[in-house]
Image (cartoon, rainbow, N blue to C red):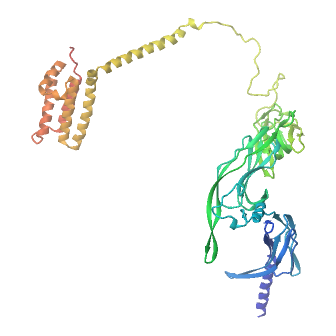
Amino acid sequence: MLRKLIFTLAVLAISVVANAADVSFSVDYPRQVVQGNKFQISFSLRNAEGNGFKAPEVGGCKLLYGPSKSSSYSSQWVNGVSSSSSSEEYTMVYRADQAGKYTVGAATVSVGGKQYSTKPFTIEILPPDRSAQQGNNRGSQSVQIDNANTQTAGKQVSSKDLFVRIILSKSNVYEQEAVVCTIKLYTKYQISQFIANIQPSYNGFLIEELPVSPNLNEIEHVNGENYMVAELKKCILFPQQSGKLTITSGTYDVTVVQYEQFRTPFGIMRQPVEKQLQVKSNTSSVNILPLPEPKPASFNGAVGNFTVSTEIKPQVLKTYEAATYSYIIRGSGNIKYLKSPTIGFPSQFDVYDPQNNINAKPSGNTVSGTVTIDYTFIPQFVGKYEIPGTEFTYFNPATRKYETLTTQKYDLTVAKGSGAASQAPKGGIEQKNRDILHIKTGDLHLKQEHSYAVEGFGYWLWYIVPLLLLAAVLFYYRKALKARSDMQLMRTKRANKVAQKRLRAAKQWMRAGDKNKFYAEVLTALWGYLSDKIQIPVSELNKENISAELTNYGATDEVIAAVIEVLNNCEFAQYAPELSGNDMESIYSAAADAMDKLENTKRKKA
């Protein structure tokens, strides 16, 4: 029994210690309120019971009620583990009486003899809408951000109720000096949709975008009116030229929420109604001042506030081994756009193109960070060398002066490394470039000769050969035109090709075993071939005039008999296939053989 009691007390002690470790005291407050409105501030004590609560004074406000104390407690048992939490809340109700920004001190509460405090905070009290006060005096209502009764459906949304502004942090800057551009939406209505159709253009500037959260979570007092404000875009601009530069306006599609009111048995109800509008922002200009003259010779376009340092790695240098000279620039300004400086490396070093490593980001109203420029070089010879210090000049807009920084000088000793010999050649001439030989001196045995190109045969050959080729092309072209103009000749030449094409079709029917179509195709091929060959239309052909025309053409009796036989066999096989003793393959071979013999027959001269 005693053992159980000790265990229970230990568990309770651990629970008390754990809860004590989780004790917190915080405050919940509005950052902005409008003068004349009521608001509340809540102080929450968690996982403890407090006493002796003391609330801070809130300037510009009148305490209407409080502190009102409320308590809550919860516990749960999950997987055999018990946990609990409790909270005490002290609520104060105030009325904002005087516009301004007020810092509120810490509230205090005592827990088990230990005092807990909240962090101080700031409340901004905005003046009331000027138009609302004037409207109340005249008996009419202007639109107010905290009054849905003034945002009725059908009411015209004026340019005073909704607009987009381009705001520049400075109106006069120097070339390359940073200026912050902010685009804000000001509205007295809730916004359900916002689409940018045409974004403002920034001609003449380099732009560094800043992250924004386009939510209506701020209130600003502008020209006597209170507006909910959202940042649409924010960027840092670096002007690249002097003169007046203008940021053009943008165009936006905006959907606002108004309220339609209607009576019900339960009272007046409101229903949200959307209204689509198109809003155009203003234009904004900035005057860019030119950098003062004369500019120092070492000025390379840096504008801002910078420091510079250098280092060489490794410390021990050897021939044919790479080393790195690092040029490090730190500061704020147009650091991302700085040019690589020229370093006076000895001519005995092979130097590679510099590599830039930029580590910079927006900070406040400018860009801050570090730029490291690494120069890789390889010493070629043993000896002592010097890398002189380099001047870095930048223009400081704060002082309106050029400021020059000088890097340290390096006296280097290069030892012999692995690789080819690194000693200078004999004769006193230093071999700085091993891939370029020294100029040869002495008698080079040169002589002067003159000859004229027109005296050689090769010169005229360049004219004769193209002329001969041109004549051959013209001759061939004219012969081809003449042949194509003779339609009968072309038809005769084409006869064999057409016939061979039809015979190929007949061969396909032969393989398919379709006799009717095979014999019809062979007959068509033969009649067409003979028509083209002896230049007589197919409708006028018969076996009698074929024999006569083929005799006149120059064919032998044997060839004529072979052609007539193929025609007879095809016709007989086509109309009486069951009585025909010829197979398709023999007919096909006889037709092809007859056309080959005719094709090899020379035509008699007229």
Front-lying residue, 86 or 452:
86
Tell me residue 207's x, y (percent): 74, 46
Tell me residue 590's x, y (percent): 18, 31
Instruction: Locate residue 594 relative to residue 93 in the image: left or right.
Output: left
Residue 474 location, quadrant = top left
Residue 119 makes an appearance in the image: yes
**Up-down relation of residue 56 to residue 405 (above or below):** below
Q: Residue lying farthest bottom?
A: 1
Instruction: Locate residue 99 relative to residue 505 in the image: left or right.
Output: right
Tell me residue 155's x, y (percent): 65, 61
Residue 322 makes an appearance in the image: no
Residue 596 location, quadrant = top left
Picture residue at 79% right of the left edge, 66% below the top: 33
**Up-down relation of residue 346 to residue 171 (above or below):** above
**Up-down relation of residue 257 to residue 252 (above or below):** below
- Look at the image and tell me in which quarter the C terminus lies: top left
Q: Residue lying farthest left?
A: 579
Picture residue at 76% right of the left edge, 21% below the top: 438
Front-lying residue, 275 or 425:
275
Picture residue at 82% right of the left edge, 64% below the top: 124
